[in-house]
């Protein structure tokens, strides 16, 4: 179980770096979002770079998503389910919990952007889970 948790964390962590931030980079390149990927600005409370904080939380969510896939024996349609889990669940958590905690209001207009980058994370997490040969169903 410890091996599964460690590899699921690493899969989610790397998915932020390789997939989530790449999607954000494409959106930035096309002028959809103003912020560039791989932001090195310090974020509270520990003052780590924003990309590192996002990667850490990507690792935590990687454990959650891959455990759910494993626990509920999700063998069919893993790619769609990873895309939808990342795109919907992570975006709604960010919009309805994280943003208000940070003093930002809920803005439904950003859902498509959040869906895009978080869906990329979901697929990327599954890519790395497969690379690591994690049993998911």
Image (cartoon, rainbow, N blue to C red):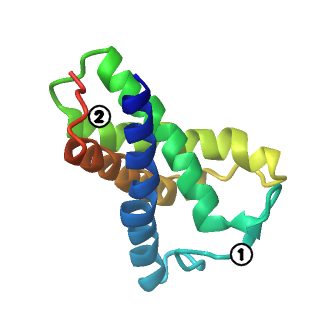
Within-10-Å neighbours for mark 2: few <14, some 14–19, many 20+: some
Q: Can you see residue 87?
A: no
Q: Is residue 78 left or right of residue 88?
A: left
The residue where tag 2 is placed is 81
The x and y percentages for residue 30 are 41, 83
Q: Nearer the viewer, mark 2 or mark 1?
A: 1
Q: Residue furthest top?
A: 72
Q: Which mark is residue 103?
A: none
Image coordinates of residue 112 in percent, x first then y, are 46, 56
Residue 100 image position (x, y, % from top left):
78, 45
Tell me which residue sits at (84%, 53%) in the image. Answer: 103
Position of residue 60 measured from the top left corner of the image (x, y, whole percent): 54, 39
Kindly identify the residue that appears in the image at 61 percent across and 39 percent down: 93
In the picture of the structure, the residue carrying the numbered disc 1 is 41
Q: Is residue 108 above or below residue 84?
A: below
Q: Is residue 68 above or below residue 126?
A: above
On the picture, is 78 further left or further right than 106? left
Tell me which corner region of the image, top left, top right, bottom left or bottom right, holds residue 6. Answer: top left
118 left or right of 91 in image: left
Query: In the displayed structure, would residue 24 be above or below residue 133?
Result: below
């Amino acid at each position: 179980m410890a091996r599964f948790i460690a590899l699921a964390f690493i899969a989610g962590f790397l998915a932020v770096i390789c997939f989530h931030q790449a999607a954000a980079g494409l959106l930035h390149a096309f002028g959809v979002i103003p912020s560039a990927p791989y932001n090195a600005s310090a974020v509270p409370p520990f003052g780590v770079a924003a990309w590192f904080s996002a990667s850490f939380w990507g690792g935590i969510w990687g454990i959650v998503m891959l455990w759910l896939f494993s626990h509920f024996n999700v063998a069919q349609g893993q790619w769609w389910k990873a895309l939808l889990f990342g795109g919907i669940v992570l975006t709604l958590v960010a919009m309805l919990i994280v943003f208000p905690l940070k003093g930002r209001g809920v803005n439904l207009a950003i859902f498509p952007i959040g869906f895009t980058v978080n869906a990329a994370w979901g697929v990327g997490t599954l890519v790395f889970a497969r690379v690591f040969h994690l049993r998911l169903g």
